[in-house]
Image (cartoon, rainbow, N blue to C red):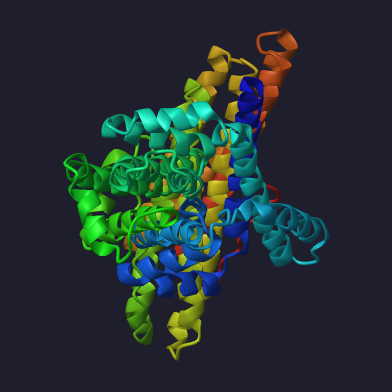
Amino acid sequence: MIREMIMGTVGGLGLFLFGMVLMSEGLRKAAGPKLKSILESMTKKSLRGFFVGAGVTAVIQSSSATTVIIVGLVNAGLLTLKQAIGVIIGSNVGTSATAWLVSASGLEFLDISMYSMPAIGLGFLLYMGGRTRKWKSVGEIMLGFGILFLGIDFMKGGFASLEDSPRVQQLFISLGDKPVWALLAGLGLTTLIQSSSASIAIIQLLAMGGAFSTNWMAALNTAIPFVLGANIGTTITAQLAALQANRNGKRAAWAHTMFNVLGCVIAFPFVYLGWYSKMVLAICPWELGGASVGASIAVAHSFFNIANSCIFLPLSPVLVKAAVWLVPVRPTEAAMPPVVLEKHLLDTPEIAIEQTKRQIVHMAKTAKRAFTHAIEGIMENNRKKLDAVKDIEDIIDSLQFEITSYLSALSGRPMADGISVRLPVLLHAVNDLERVGDHAMNIMEIAQRKIEQKLTFSDSARVEAQMLRTNAEQMFDDVIAALETGDIAPARAALTIEKRLNEAQVELRRTHVGRMSEGACSAHAGLIFIDLVDNVEKIGDHLTNIAQATIGGLQWEGIKPKIVHGL
């Protein structure tokens, strides 16, 4: 039994996390502006998001599943943290539908893991056989969804024998006069089987069978602390999902945990004094006995979640602040303010162009930050700085999408010729900056190889790498200054630096090959150093395009963009 529990938990956890990664990546690829706008419109108001969460959870019979999906949507950038909290609060109310099904029908609760196999099969077919990227992404979502719930099913299966164990029933009965321990037992059981719906259903069935007590008031007093513990235990699933999520995904998981834990803290004094059971009995129109005690537990569960929602739904901005405080931005990460591109300014193209330029400047500063973290990471073997590069690259991709979408919308508005000719140049500048971020990612990847293979640069190579960094950062500063002020002097200075980078690429390749021949540097370290030189030179090429565009007044005339092959 112990071996089954361990193997089921470990294997199920691996499947669960793998499914989460697949689903999140599929959502990121498949979600276009239309899906994003639909989700935003559905959850723009906290109250509307609350009803969406309650409805979805009532259908799929799992608040854990809903919360995992919400963490995935936040992780994919499709929901803001504030929008997600409304849905999470609603999911807690929706999950009480399972308790009503158990009490009303006497049937086992609906386990959505039964859909995992068809989802995996269909998802795999779409992922492998889909003709378009969209269908492949949909298949990846379905495949991830199915694997995720298959993992939950494996974890639950590992502990399936606990449900029928007389020792477990005896434990429940012995905890009747110890509400604190009963709460912890409910928390532990839900953590083990990964479903509050499952653990509350077990509690209901035990109570309906007389396992707690033949005194129904005593049975209710025993069951309610278990229900509170189950509500805390169900947050573990979201926390597991957040292990593979980005910072906002982790914040959504912590908001879920805070909401449930604080609700239990508020309710527990009433439970401990016996007042909660009396409130439930006052609500119930029936005499307790047999199956009706299960319905009373369902009332207790629903009442807790509804009351909790009434308290915390208006306080969702406070939960957002608390979640941000619990999961702050690390010093090595780039804190980026939201993109500010006002759509109502599209009818004033001159102003729209100016605010677009400000966002491009911000994108250039962000790209420089990605490069700085990457070059410091490879020189210092600093994993934290290298990890930050991926987060910054996500920001750069987001900026590219928002600015490109805004310029595309602007292109459809009537404007003077002097403004319209600047649009394609600005679009190319945005694409060049996005490619700069790609090269920073390349440097991050070769730095990770350097660390994993325990390679070191020679003292000469370190001096040369520092020279590259100094020149590239100065080129960034000159290009940013030219974009901000429109002054061509720093743009011309950037072109001068680019010539130095081109000359350095040839010279450093030659000297480094010489060091490898002399045995002063290993072949593997030499290849990594040459990759570093090439990526810095390509970054210089993309910055050159922007500098030339600035010198040309952000118009095509006189501009000869430098073509950069490869990443």
Residue placed most toward the observer, 105 or 248: 105
Q: For this view, does 73 lie left or right of residue 561?
A: left
Residue placed most toward the observer, 464 or 338: 338
| Residue extending farthest top | 519
Q: How many marks?
A: 0
Residue 265, relative to residue 31: is it above or below? Answer: above
Residue 140, relative to residue 446: is it above or below? Answer: below
Image location (x, y in percent) of residue 433: 51, 54
| Residue extending farthest bottom | 414
Query: Looking at the image, which residue is at 48% across and 80% down?
Result: 409
Image location (x, y in percent) of residue 364: 43, 53
Residue 287, relative to residue 235: is it above or below? Answer: below
Residue placed most toward the observer, 224 or 399: 224
Q: For this view, does 462 lie left or right of residue 267?
A: right
Query: Looking at the image, which residue is at 46% across and 39% down?
Result: 190
Q: Is any atom of residue 412 visible in this view? A: yes
Query: Looking at the image, which residue is at 34% across and 66% down?
Result: 340
Image location (x, y in percent) of residue 295: 40, 58
Q: Is any atom of residue 551 visible in this view? A: no
Q: Quadrant of the N terminus?
A: top right
Residue 128, relative to residue 513: is it above or below? Answer: below
Image location (x, y in percent) of residue 5: 61, 27
